[in-house]
Image (tube, rainbow, N blue to C red):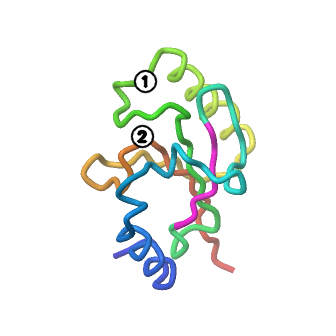
Amino acid sequence: MDFRKKRTLKKYHAYRSTKDFKMKCDFCITEPSSKKQSFVYWKILKNIFPYDRIAEEHDLIIPKRHFQHESEMTNNERAELVHIKSHQLSAHKKYDFIWENFLHMRSMEHYHLHLLRFKRKK
């Protein structure tokens, strides 16, 4: 099962097959329109290929410095991430779930976390 609607999934696969995707890290070259919030070491972006089958809102927490694994985080990056997760996100209760990717399922080689607010039954 894919978490994206067919149209979003089609756009996602089309983008992943482009030469640009293979040559750059999109998380390092962020379009200003997708940036929602910025911190010293981290930023929150709107996911341009969201899990729109299951989520009303799908954002990403991304380190400003490129690294692939949690073990590569500096102490300052880790402290700020803990602060963002515990104060910014839990205090505002905007998201239902913070999803850290499994290494074998990542599409981006830049460490990131997914912020999801699930769709509600009406």
| 64 with respect to 90 (left or right) | left
Q: Residue at x 31, y 48 (%)?
A: 102
Does the stretch in magenta take in 7? no
**Farthest-out residue, top:** 75
- Residue 87 vs residue 69, the one in the foreground: 69
Residue 84: percent from left, percent from top = 63, 32
Mark 2 is on which residue type?
Answer: Tyr
- Total numbered badges shown on the rendered structure: 2
Q: Judge the density around disc 1: few (<14), some (14-19), many (≥20) Cα neighbours within 10 Å.
A: some
- Tag 2–tag 1 contact (CB < 8 Å): yes
Mark 1 is on which residue type?
Answer: Met
Secondary structure at badge 1 equals: loop
* Residue 111: mark: 2
Which range of residues does the magenta coloring cover? 43-50
Q: Residue at x 51, y 78 (%)?
A: 8
Q: Earlier in the sequence, mark 2 or mark 1?
A: 1
Using the image, determine if residue 73 lies above or below residue 64.
above
Residue 103: percent from left, percent from top = 28, 46
Residue 73: percent from left, percent from top = 43, 24
- Residue 58 vs residue 64, the one in the foreground: 64
| 78 with respect to 19 (left or right) | right
Residue at the disc numbered 1: 73
